[in-house]
């Protein structure tokens, strides 16, 4: 009885062997980080503008 079970299990594995496929995607995965980069640029520009105003009050009268 054990021999038949082993043979059946082997046949089942062989039959299912062609059904399972692992395939890489055709397009590359793209991660867009533009938002983070733009926020850093805005913060740096804002700081530079504030420093310019503070260091040259005669150019920017209130």
Image (spheres, rainbow, N blue to C red):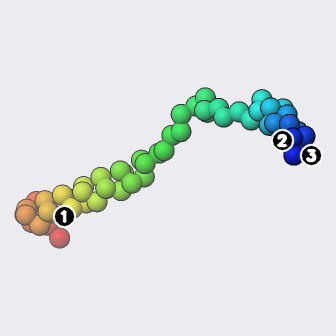
Occupied quadrant, residue 36: bottom left
| Percent of width and height locating residue 2 | 87, 46
In the rendered image, the quadrant that contains the C terminus is: bottom left
Any mark on residue 10, and which?
A: none
Name which residue lies at 28% across and 60% down: 43
Q: Of the two numbered discs 3 and 1 on the same chain, state the one appearing first in sequence.
A: 3
Q: Nearer the viewer, mark 3 or mark 2?
A: 3
Assess whether mark 2 and mark 3 are in contact (beta carbons under 8 angstroms). no
Q: Of the two numbered discs 3 and 2 on the same chain, state the one appearing first in sequence.
A: 3
Q: CA distance from mark 1 to mark 2?
A: 79 Å
Assess whether mark 1 and mark 3 are in contact (beta carbons under 8 angstroms). no
Residue 38 seen from this side: yes
Residue 46 placement, left or right of 24: left
Q: Nearer the viewer, residue 25 or 62?
A: 25
Any mark on residue 6, and which?
A: 2
- The crowding category of the residue bearing disc 2, from other C-alpha atoms within 10 Å (few below 14, some 14 to 19, many at least 20), is few
User: Which residue is identified by label 1?
Assistant: 50
| Percent of width and height locating residue 21 | 71, 33
User: Which residue is identified by label 3?
Assistant: 1
Q: CA distance from mark 3 to mark 2?
A: 9 Å
Q: Nearer the viewer, residue 4 or 47?
A: 4
| Percent of width and height locating residue 14 | 80, 32
């Amino acid at each position: 009885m054990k021999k038949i079970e082993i043979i059946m299990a082997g046949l089942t594995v062989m039959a299912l062997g062609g059904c399972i496929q692992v395939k890489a995607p055709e397009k590359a995965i793209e991660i867009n980080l533009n938002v983070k980069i733009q926020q850093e640029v805005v913060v740096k520009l804002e700081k530079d503008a504030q420093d310019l105003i503070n260091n040259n009050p005669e150019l920017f009268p209130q």
